[in-house]
Amino acid sequence: MDDEIVAYQCANCGTLNRIPRTRLKDDPKCGRCKASVFPDKPVVASDASWKKEVEDSPIPVLVDFWAPWCGPCRAVAPSLEQIAKERKGRIKIVKLNVDENPRAASLHGVQSIPTLLLQRGPLFLDRVAGALPKEELDSWLDRFL
């Protein structure tokens, strides 16, 4: 399966890029705009875009279930933005507002926020509830990535 091709939209211009699976960790560039195909900041998802943003991602995804009124959610946001920059191409950070998207939160058993869910494609890897400091988030991610 070394020659398997993955189709993925550029985070910058939306162009569909065909990337060999063996090159996913090399931070591939878009054929059209030459920017990195994978995002270097959190991506907003919804119930409708869950499959596209999370399950169809060729790289692992860290989903942040949050709400704008939640203080701990706002406290962990800068750490997630920093992780998105530092681990660009190795992990995708997705933010899902639970007030606007109750279906995805309910399907994944989210009962408190912030809840961070780690997935690789449709495969659930782990979850953590509460606002963790960046160092703890990094060590948690290192166990899976």
Image: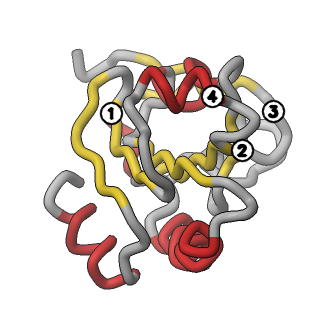
Image height of 138 relative to 120, above or below: below
Q: Is residue 74 left or right of residue 13?
A: left
Residue 44 numbered mark, or none: 2
- Label 1 to label 2: alpha-carbon separation: 18 Å
Q: Are marks 1 and 2 in contact (CB under 8 Å)?
A: no
Residue plotted at (19% across, 52% down): 144
Q: Earlier in the sequence, mark 1 or mark 4?
A: 4
Left or right of 123 on screen, residue 6: right
Mark 2 to mark 3 CA distance (whole Å):
15 Å
Which of discs 4 and 3 lies nearer the camera? The answer is 4
Considering only vertical position in the picture, is 112 above or below 58? below
Q: Which mark is residue 102?
A: 4
Name the mark nearer the viewer: 1 or 2: 2
Q: Amino acid at mark 3?
A: Gly
Mark on residue 99?
none
Residue at horizontal 74%, vertical 54%?
35
Q: Earlier in the sequence, mark 2 or mark 3?
A: 3
Residue 83 lies, in percent from the top left, at 48, 71
